[in-house]
Image (cartoon, rainbow, N blue to C red):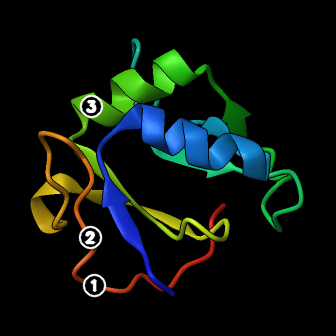
């Protein structure tokens, strides 16, 4: 698997949408107020698609939380594989978001 790491939300959306991916958050994991909590990308035929704790959010909400939490996405352009990671531990170029991953992630998307 040739994974990529990005911080570019437009790139993430362009990759996720053709795979049926939608922005989501895990209910009950955020602080009071506007904190969405744990972010995910949900896919319709994933084993987690029917998880009652996963709630769809808008791309704008997801992008705001993604930036506020300093996240990057490790993903495989040819599949649905993805993993959200901290920018401080990824090799993402936080200015442009097109760096190559220096590590292999091992979890399927949610």
Q: Is 46 left, or right, of 85 in this rendering?
A: right
How busy is the neighbourhood of tag 2: few (under 14 within 10 Å), some, or many (20 plus)?
A: some
Q: Nearer the viewer, mark 2 or mark 1?
A: 2
Q: Is 15 left, or right, of 55 in this rendering?
A: left
Q: Pinpoint residue 101: horizontal percent, then vertical percent.
A: 28, 74
Q: Is residue 65 above or below residue 90?
A: above
How busy is the neighbourhood of tag 1: few (under 14 within 10 Å), some, or many (20 plus)?
A: few
Instruction: State how far apart marks 1 and 3 are (Cα).
Output: 22 Å
Q: Which mark is residue 100?
A: 2
Q: Pinpoint residue 71: horizontal percent, then vertical percent.
A: 28, 47
Q: Quadrant of the C terminus?
A: bottom right
Circle 1 residue: 103
Marks 2 and 1 close (CB-CB < 8 Å): no
Q: Please say whether residue 6 is visible from this viewpoint.
A: yes
Q: Which mark is residue 30?
A: none
Q: Is residue 86 above or below residue 41?
A: below
Instruction: State how far apart marks 2 and 1 are (Cα).
Output: 9 Å
Give the camera-side residue of 106 and 11. Answer: 11
Q: Is residue 51 above or below residue 61?
A: below
Question: Which secondary structure, mark 3?
Answer: helix
Circle 3 residue: 67
Q: Pinpoint residue 31: horizontal percent, then vertical percent.
A: 37, 27
Q: Is 107 left, or right, of 49 in this rendering?
A: left
Q: Nearer the viewer, mark 3 or mark 2?
A: 2
How busy is the neighbourhood of tag 3: few (under 14 within 10 Å), some, or many (20 plus)?
A: some
Q: Name the residue: 48% across, 28% down.
A: 62
């Amino acid at each position: 698997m040739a994974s990529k790491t990005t911080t570019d939300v437009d790139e993430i959306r362009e990759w996720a949408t053709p795979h049926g991916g939608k922005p989501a958050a895990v209910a009950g994991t955020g602080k009071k107020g506007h904190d969405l909590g744990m972010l995910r990308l949900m896919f319709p035929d994933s084993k987690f698609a029917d998880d009652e704790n996963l709630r769809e959010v808008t791309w704008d909400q997801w992008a705001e939380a993604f930036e506020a939490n300093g996240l990057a996405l490790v993903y495989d352009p040819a599949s649905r594989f993805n993993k959200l990671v901290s920018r401080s531990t990824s090799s993402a170029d936080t200015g442009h978001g097109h760096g190559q991953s220096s590590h292999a992630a091992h979890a399927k998307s949610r």
